[in-house]
Amino acid sequence: MADLTTSLFGWTLKNPIMPAAGPPVRDAKMAKACIEGGVGALVTKTISTTAASVPTPNMWDLKSYFLNTELWSELPPEHWLEKEFPEIRRLADEAGIPVIISMGYTAEEIAALAPKVKPFADAVELSTHYIEDDPRPMQEAIRAAKEALDVPVLVKMSPFREPQPAALAAVEAGVDGIVATNSFGPAFGIDIERGGRPLMGGKGYGWLSGPALKPIALRMVYDIAQVVDVPIIGVGGISKGTDVVEYLMAGASAVGICTAAITRGPGIFGKIAKQLNKWLDNNGYASVAEIQGLTLRQQIPTMEAPPILIPEKCTGCNFCVISCVYDALYLDENRKIAIVEDNCFKCGVCLSRCPVDALASPY
């Protein structure tokens, strides 16, 4: 079996998988379920100096993506400090895993909360979901947390910001790690079966997460990893082991999962860890450390020749032919793949469409 052990901020995690701040860690009961589900570390739902007034309905699963109008915790900070955090701390200590407490949003709010959460936190995560392009509010929040705490301070980036300048500004302010990314939005969904009403409560729109967010979040991790040398926790659209592989290859040290834990329950953490282990075994890697940052060391591909055809594998499904807008591919009299090389634009879409590997990459 591959070694999933992950080193992060001096901790040794049994695997690189944790919940992302959100409903799956809304209280100690849910945190316990995440521990039992197989996480390597805990992250709590974001708190602020007041409880959030969360509109309803506030979550909707559209399969390829997920909409939410979730805010920070609907529980007041006093409740967290008196009940949830002590129990989460006890549960985490019993399980031997660290606790990352998520909080927001302004420097003033962080300064007020940080000393109070100090007894319970192995690290803190600062949400910047409502901070725009000006990095100074984020930097002030980081400095407020660093002044009050002696544990690692992470900052969570939003996907509508340019990641590299934001990451550099965060490191300049003393941040110890970066979480990338938060949900994207505002986004909008319509219920066509009920007169075209909006799916979300509140203002009618929400924030995008789930599978559709993954390419955006991966880009953020990849970009950030190129300019800073602090651990990155990748978050966005993770629902299976190969998603974790992608994030680690892009430069993440660990990953956070929220939407999949909502739609498939807290047992998803352990399932994804097993899938990750199986993929590493099947692909000849002995540990997660061996794949971390691999993409950062790869050249950007250039397709300079048409795809390599392997007709004996072709089943005649026609998927690649239908997708070839340049009329380069066709099925011959034996319903095997053939090509007009002069027409090939080398776009590469056929390589992704073939279900039986009858087309091979020339690069």
Image: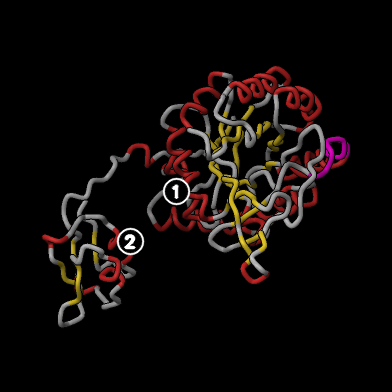
Image position, residue 26 (x, y; %):
76, 48
Looking at the image, which is closer to me, 81 or 173? Answer: 173
Image position, residue 181 (x, y; %):
56, 41
Checking the image for residue 246, the label placed there is 1
Looking at the image, which is closer to me, 25 or 109? Answer: 109
The way the protein has been coloured in the rendering is: secondary structure
Dot 2, crowdedness within 10 Å: few (<14), some or many (≥20)? Answer: few
Indicate yes or no whether the magenta region holds residue 208. no
**Horizontal arrangement in the rendering, residue 289 relative to residue 264 (left or right):** left
Magenta part of the chain: 74-82
Above or below, 352 against 83 in this view is: below
Checking the image for residue 347, the label placed there is none
Tell me the CA gap for discs 2 and 1: 17 Å
Image position, residue 21 (x, y; %):
67, 43
Q: Which residue is identified by label 2?
A: 352
Local SS, label 2: helix
| Secondary structure mostly seen in the magenta stretch | helix
Please tell me which of labels 2 and 1 falls first in the chain: 1
Question: What amino acid does circle 2 point to?
Answer: Ser
Above or below, 5 against 61 in this view is: above
Local SS, label 1: helix
Question: What amino acid does circle 1 point to?
Answer: Glu
Above or below, 198 against 42 in this view is: below
